[in-house]
Amino acid sequence: MRKANFFLFFLLLVTLTACNFFTSDKNALPDSEGDINEVSIIIDDVYWNGDVGDSLRAKLAHSIDGLNKEEPVLKINQFSPKIVNNQINLQRNLVIIQQHDETEFIHVENKYAYPQNVFYFKGPTIKDLLQLITLHGEILESSIHFYELLKVQEDMAASPFNDKRIQNQYKISLLMPYQYRYALVNDNFLWLKKELSTGSNSLLIYQVPIHRMENEIDFIENFVQVRDSVTQKYIKGVNKDSYMHVDKGYAPYFKKIFFAEAIECYEFRGTWDLTNDFMEGPYLSYVFKDELYNRYLFLDGFVYNPSQSKRDLIFELEAIIKSIYFY
């Protein structure tokens, strides 16, 4: 059996660069609070309104790649140490900035609640704090991202979708919420959809032979051509001759993803729209090179949620796709 593990790399980074002082018994702690992708920063107002605050915002509130409207990667709440109370201490993600004689970055799990991650930046001067944030800012954001994905997957596991058809057709298993339904099914294509009051969240599953992605054409262009050919066939608009395609006005965000097993994976982010229609939104696609079955497997998520936030919907799709298990 083959299993995908997206999180091994992030766990290694967290272990190497953060000091985990203790992990408390979850039964002895209250439940943590906070929305998905929300972080509370406890920091003096003077620091928050100066260079230290600017540095933290640059690390934790930068724009998400691939959205058609800018949204920060995390929602930040700032609290002065003077007003911190037990309610604030229950937040799932806490970043605490402290003036201290020694300079150190510390990660503590489950200090006040469960599950919880508390990150301390300590230093005697503003310069020391800025150096700490520069040095550890990326692992801070990656760690929060990693643990939030686990939280979403834990929530999905409480009431999961029955993925037996996916297992039989594509030899993979996915963890996803029970609210998803099959919008379209055939031998070469699956479309799963979750209806929202303001739109929908969708996941497409399809595959092509390895040679279809590996030819003289650029790999990114191959991806666009394959995706457009599939969505033109299956994802239609209301108007005549209306179908989904990749927005050609912006090149997809593209990167190779670290994979724990001998399966290459590529991430694409960008925006889609409909020909002869006004619908649009972001997409998130993971393309797996699976030599056992001589295929590139596409797990292709997209969001339609006009005039509303897309961040947490794209994040849910990422959590679903990163739960993949290969048989």
Image (cartoon, helix red, strand yellow):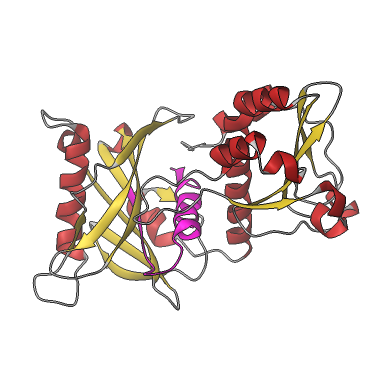
Q: Position of residue 2 (x, y in %)?
A: 46, 36
- On screen, residue 210 versus residue 33, left or right, reads left
Q: Position of residue 122 (x, y in %)?
A: 79, 29
> In percent of the image, x 39 and y 61: which residue is there?
165
Image quadrant where one finds the C terminus:
top left
Residue lying at the far right in this picture: please name it: 28
Magenta stretch contains residue 315: yes
Q: Position of residue 182 (x, y in %)?
A: 36, 69
Does residue 133 sit above or below 34 in this rendering?
A: above
- On screen, residue 228 versus residue 51, left or right, reads left
- On screen, residue 285 versus residue 42, left or right, reads left
In-front residue for pair 4/219 = 219
Does residue 220 sit above or below 230 in this rendering?
A: above
Camera sees residue 63: yes
Q: Where on the picture, by quarter, is residue 245?
A: bottom left
Q: Which residues are magenta?
A: 299-327
Camera sees residue 95: no
> In percent of the image, x 74 and y 46: which residue is there?
45
- On screen, residue 216 versus residue 10, left or right, reads left
> In percent of the image, x 21 and y 53: which residue is there?
247
